[in-house]
């Protein structure tokens, strides 16, 4: 039950943040937070990571839905397994992030990204994330480590 609560929490948090970003920010507008370490700005990502597949949005959407469904089945199968806590938590984070980004793709035809790191490397500063992206990355790492243990 705690895993489901976290998935719903990630989805709800992202839904609220993305709604706020969509309503209050304009594309290109920047706002620095956390003593300038973070840059908040709205970006409509019409592809996948780093806008990959931007020219074939339908394929990105289909792949996103298919992977989310497949991971949901794998996740459901792990819930009955004794142990494997790291794997379960990894899949929990991964699905929380995947569901929120897939929801955006299905309802808006793009994913709302909104945070960058204010680092000296210009190329890295241009990459815009959302919380779902971080959940996917951390969840994928935990899942790999948890599966291999």
Image: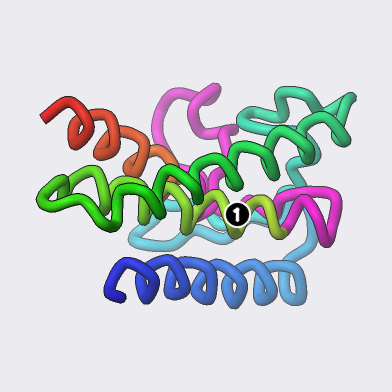
What is the magenta range?
104-133
Does residue 4 sit above or below 55 in this rendering?
Answer: below
Answer with left or right where residue 83 lies relative to residue 9.
left
Answer with left or right where residue 57 lies relative to residue 103.
right
Using the rendered image of the protein, determine whether residue 37 is visible from the camera's viewpoint.
no
Residue 120 in the image, given as x and y percentages of width and height: 40, 28
In the figure, residue 68 lies in which quadrant? Answer: top right
- Residue drawn where x is 56% and y is 57% of the image: 40
Does residue 28 sit above or below 96 in this rendering?
Answer: above
Residue 22 in the image, given as x and y percentages of width and height: 75, 68
Does residue 8 sit above or below 125 in this rendering?
Answer: below
Task: Compare residues 112 and 81 and report the one nearer the observer.
Answer: 81
Task: Compare residues 24 and 80 and report the one nearer the observer.
Answer: 80
- Residue drawn where x is 72% and y is 29% of the image: 51
Residue 114 in the image, given as x and y percentages of width and height: 60, 54
Residue 29 in the image, given as x and y percentages of width and height: 71, 56
In the figure, residue 99 lies in which quadrant? Answer: bottom right
Task: Compare residues 77 and 55 and report the one nearer the observer.
Answer: 77
Give the total of numbered labels.
Answer: 1
- Residue drawn where x is 17% and y is 25% of the image: 148
Q: Which colour scheme is used?
A: rainbow
- Residue drawn where x is 72% and y is 75% of the image: 24
Q: What residue would you read off at disc 1?
A: 114
Answer with left or right where residue 98 lies relative to residue 89.
right
């Amino acid at each position: 039950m705690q895993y489901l609560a976290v998935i719903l929490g990630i989805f709800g948090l992202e839904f609220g943040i993305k709604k706020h970003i969509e309503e209050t920010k304009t594309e290109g507008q920047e706002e620095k937070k956390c003593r300038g370490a973070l840059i908040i700005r709205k970006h409509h990502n019409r592809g996948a990571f780093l806008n990959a597949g931007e020219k074939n949005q339908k394929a990105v959407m289909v792949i996103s839905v298919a992977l989310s469904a497949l991971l949901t089945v794998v996740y459901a199968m792990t819930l009955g397994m004794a142990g494997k806590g790291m794997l379960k938590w990894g899949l929990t984070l991964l699905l929380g992030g995947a569901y929120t980004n897939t929801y955006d793709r299905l309802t808006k035809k793009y994913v709302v990204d909104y945070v960058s790191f204010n680092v000296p490397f210009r190329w890295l500063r241009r990459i815009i994330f959302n919380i779902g992206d971080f959940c996917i990355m951390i969840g994928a790492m935990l899942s790999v480590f948890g599966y291999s243990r």
